[in-house]
Image (cartoon, grey):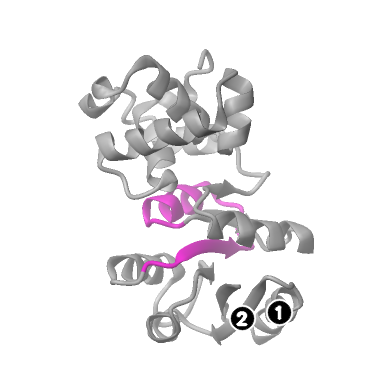
Amino acid sequence: MIRIVVVDDQAMVRDGFTALLDRQPDMTVVGAAGDGEHAVVLCRRERPDVVLMDVRLPVLDGLAATRLLLDGPHRPRVLILTTFDLDEYVYEALRSGAGGFLLKDARAEELVNAVRVVAQGHALLAPQVTARLIERFVAQAPTRPRELAGLTPRETEVLGQVARGLSNAEIAERLSIAEETVKTHVGRILAKLGLRDRVQAVVLAYESGLAGDRRR
């Protein structure tokens, strides 16, 4: 079961998300909070797998709460939810360590799928959020960090595909290699670059300009 905490300052939204997710056979909502400070306390107690985190919260905003949660011993996957389709939230959410970003007007099935994707450790961006938006916020760092020089050409190619949000199976199909080979490449990429997960790999790829290289 995927254990979930729902964080939103509107009670009707919290209740709606809770009802939707609790109906899923592989999910259970273990708590809900109306502000970021309560969310941090609740999550440290309940140790959820996934946290649905609103951005604009009283007491402590969603991005600050996310940073606190990911600095702790138990690091849940955080799916940022907001009604605000603003570029800076996308990038800051990912830099804060969030596993995904979804707008609140997403369909119910999109939200349910997003929870499953994030719970599996994959990065997820709302369909409305394009690479162009994120690239605008990392344009000031167009040169690739020296760490990337340690990657093989194939690892660099795989990292570029990871940055586009592709799963291992999709990367394997696109590059005509075995899925297990992709998994091995991803593991080596994370180890070489000292990254925690695929989300950090996505951020680094955008910061370095790799994700903007359309030839890859």
Q: Please name the amino acid that badge 2 sits on.
A: Val
* Residue identified by numbered label 1: 22
The residue under the point 52% across, 46% down is 87
Residue segment shown in magenta: 75-98
Element type at marker 2?
strand
Residue 139: x %, y % from top left: 39, 30
At label 2, counting other C-alpha atoms closer than 10 Å, the crowd grade (few under 14, some 14-19, many 20 or more) is many
Q: Verify CB contact (< 8 Å) between mark 1 and mark 2.
A: yes
Q: Is 210 displayed left or right of 164 in the figure?
A: left
Q: In the image, is residue 110 above or below residue 123? A: below
| Residue sitting nearer the eye, 89 or 214 | 214
The image quadrant of residue 209 is top left
- Number of the label disc, if any, that sits on residue 29: 2
| Quadrant placement of the N terminus | bottom right
Element type at marker 1?
helix
The residue under the point 24% across, 23% down is 150
- Number of the label disc, if any, that sits on residue 107: none
| Residue sitting nearer the eye, 22 or 203 | 22
Furthest toward the left, the residue is 146
Q: In the image, is residue 197 above or below residue 114? A: above
Is residue 107 something that shows in the picture? no
Q: In the image, is residue 102 above or below residue 199? A: below
Q: Is residue 82 magenta?
A: yes
Q: In the image, is residue 215 above or below residue 156? A: above
Residue 142: x %, y % from top left: 34, 24
The image quadrant of residue 3 is bottom right
